[in-house]
Image: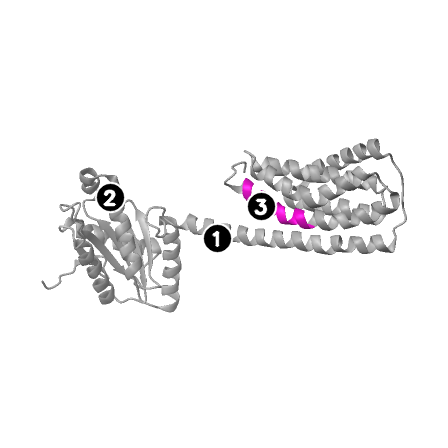
């Protein structure tokens, strides 16, 4: 959080506008309470600086700091110190005092929780001690109508500004949570579902097929001789092959189809509402497209796929059993020469699919 390009700087920016609004309208409350007490001229100059210039000085000070978060934490404690200073300067006039101290505390709660609140109280006490030494102490318990009206903007506008900042922060946190959730389900290399997320969806589709008696096919796809590709052309090229295949799947699959990276050079598909013939045609088109990949910089690179398919059957015991049938079909395709699509029969025996030349 101390990184000036990270959360520390964003924290400084979030505090900037509420500080401008809070100290600007707080100036009215304090000025109305100070006026009957005839404070020295330097107190008025300090009040103008604190209310009008300090927000910008504090922002630039923290923004240019090597540790923006710590710098803004320091600025908030200075805000609390000045809040305590003005309560003594106002001779503890009830409404302005409660208004200033409560708004300061609200800000500390929102920005730093209990720890900052405790530190803020100590800073307020330090400010009170400083004001007592410079201005003396007194007690003025009568609040005039003018002072009441002067406190109204602070009691209404500042909570609104703080609430607005908190609302936008909540929206940002919700978006970050959504992105983190998506990342936890996604394979970092290919952008497809990772192994665990895809297995969870397989269970859902298996249960849906059982309940609704809808057709579905799953596919396991293996890049043939992928280790040789890595050894011959390097792992960077191997990663490019996997990304190219994943992009092909994203472009050509239907919206309801679910693609994932099963592990290493294996990919997995769920094709809901798909017949055996449709699945075979779709996977054969995929195999042919991949076989046609050419890279002018790597003219000797050839890519082929072995694909195993398994249709949902009512007698399947579990999603794992369904996946096992596709796995058997895949390894049958690899044993029979690779670069082909095989389908698991109802008896669990893989069938090689032949297509006319």
**Residue 356 spot, x, y in % from top left:** 10, 64
Q: Which residue is mark 1?
A: 178
- Indicate the secondary structure of the residue bearing disc 3: helix
Q: Which residue is mark 2?
A: 238
Nearer to us: label 1 or label 3: 3
x 28%, y 44%: residue: 264
Name the quadrant of the N terminus.
Answer: top right
x 19%, y 60%: residue: 284
Count of marks placed on residues: 3
The residue segment tinted magenta is 8-21
> Is 15 on the left-hand or right-hand side of 33?
left
Mark 2 crowdedness (10 Å alpha carbons): few <14, some 14-19, many ≥20: some
Q: Is residue 181 magenta?
A: no
3D distance between C-alphas at marks 2 and 3: 44 Å
3D distance between C-alphas at marks 1 and 3: 23 Å
Tell me, yes or no, if residue 153 can be seen here.
Answer: yes
Q: Are marks 2 and 1 in contact (CB under 8 Å)?
A: no
Of marks 2 and 1, which one's residue comes earlier in the chain?
A: 1
Q: Are marks 1 and 3 in contact (CB under 8 Å)?
A: no
- Indicate the secondary structure of the residue bearing disc 1: helix
Q: Farthest front residue?
A: 41
The part of the image, by quadrant, that contains residue 351 is: bottom left
Mark 3 crowdedness (10 Å alpha carbons): few <14, some 14-19, many ≥20: some
3D distance between C-alphas at marks 2 and 1: 31 Å
In depth, the one of 187 and 200 nearer the eye is 187
**Residue 225 spot, x, y in % from top left:** 18, 44
Mark 1 crowdedness (10 Å alpha carbons): few <14, some 14-19, many ≥20: few
**Residue 133 spot, x, y in % from top left:** 83, 31
Q: Which residue is mark 3?
A: 13
Q: Farthest left residue?
A: 357
Of marks 2 and 3, which one's residue comes earlier in the chain?
A: 3
């Amino acid at each position: 959080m101390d990184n000036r390009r990270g959360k520390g700087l964003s924290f400084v920016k979030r505090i900037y506008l509420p500080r401008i609004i809070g100290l600007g309208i707080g100036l009215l409350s304090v000025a109305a309470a100070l006026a009957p007490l005839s404070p020295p001229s330097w107190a008025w100059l300090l009040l103008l600086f604190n209310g009008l210039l300090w927000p910008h000085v504090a922002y630039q000070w923290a923004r240019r700091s090597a540790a923006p978060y710590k710098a803004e934490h320091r600025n908030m404690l200075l805000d609390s110190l000045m809040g305590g200073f003005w309560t003594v300067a106002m001779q503890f006039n009830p409404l302005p005092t409660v208004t200033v101290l409560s708004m300061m505390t609200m800000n500390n709660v929102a920005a730093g929780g209990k720890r900052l609140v405790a530190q803020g109280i100590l800073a307020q006490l330090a400010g009170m001690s400083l004001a007592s030494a410079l201005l003396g102490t007194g007690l003025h318990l009568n609040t005039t109508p003018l002072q009441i009206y002067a406190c109204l903007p602070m009691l209404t506008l500042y909570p609104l500004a703080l609430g607005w900042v908190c609302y936008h922060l909540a929206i940002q946190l919700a978006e970050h949570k959504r992105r983190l959730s998506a990342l936890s389900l996604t394979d970092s290399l290919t952008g497809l579902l990772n192994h665990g997320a895809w297995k969870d969806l397989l269970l859902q589709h298996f249960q849906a097929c059982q309940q609704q008696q809808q057709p579905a096919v799953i596919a396991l796809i293996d890049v043939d001789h992928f280790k040789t590709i890595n050894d011959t052309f390097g792992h960077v090229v191997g990663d490019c092959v996997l990304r190219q295949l994943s992009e092909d799947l994203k472009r050509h699959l239907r919206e309801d189809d679910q693609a994932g990276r099963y592990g290493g050079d294996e990919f997995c598909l769920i094709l809901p509402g798909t017949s055996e013939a449709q699945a075979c045609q779709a996977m054969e088109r995929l195999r042919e497209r991949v076989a046609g990949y050419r890279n002018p910089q790597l003219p000797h690179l050839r890519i082929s796929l072995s694909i195993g398919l398994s249709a949902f059957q009512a007698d399947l015991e579990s999603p794992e059993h369904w996946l096992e049938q596709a796995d058997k079909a895949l390894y049958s395709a690899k044993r029979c020469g690779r670069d082909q699509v095989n389908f698991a029969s109802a008896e669990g025996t893989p069938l090689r699919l032949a297509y006319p030349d």
